[in-house]
Amino acid sequence: PRPTQLDRRRQRQMCIRDSITTWAIGAVAEHGFKEFGLQRIHADPYTNNPASARALEKAGFVLEGVMKASVVKNGEVLDQFLYARTRA
């Protein structure tokens, strides 16, 4: 079946949201480096959240590893990615 106009609109909205998220992550990181003199910024999204991992990668963060069984959320033990970005 062909995608409907509503499907295409939803895809555009998701693309715009993803772009804004990536831009915001990058802007906050740059602010931390410039205004606070930070040398390294890290993020640790859950491994079951690939959208967050993708946004971090697009914003220049590098995957450093996976932290196994590192957090308990709602009674479930979860793994986390470890991403970092260093001052250029």
Image (cartoon, helix red, strand yellow):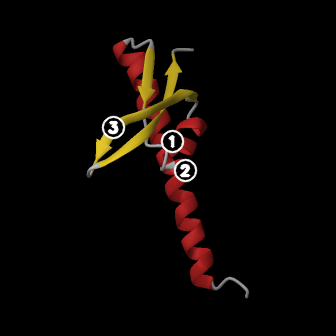
Residue 62 lies, in percent from the top left, at 58, 27
Indicate the secondary structure of the residue bearing disc 3.
strand
Left or right: residue 21 versus residue 63 is: left
Indicate the secondary structure of the residue bearing disc 1.
helix
Left or right: residue 13 versus residue 1 is: left
Query: Residue 64's image quarter?
Result: top right
Specify which label sits upstream in the sequence, 3 or 2.
2
CB within 8 Å, label 2 to label 1: yes
* Residue situated furthest right in the rendering: 1
Specify which label sits upstream in the sequence, 1 or 3.
1
Residue 88 lies, in percent from the top left, at 57, 14
The quarter in which the N terminus is drawn is bottom right
Residue 77 lies, in percent from the top left, at 35, 44
Q: Amino acid at mark 2?
A: Ser
Question: For the residues marked 3 and 2, what is the alpha-carbon distance in whole angstroms?
Answer: 28 Å
Question: For the residues marked 2 and 1, what is the alpha-carbon distance in whole angstroms?
Answer: 6 Å
The residue singled out by tag 1 in the image is: 23
Query: Residue 3's image quarter?
Result: bottom right
Q: Residue at x 42, y 17 (%)?
A: 34
Q: Amino acid at mark 3?
A: Val
The residue singled out by tag 3 in the image is: 71
* Picture layout, residue 6 above or below residue 26: below
The residue singled out by tag 2 in the image is: 19
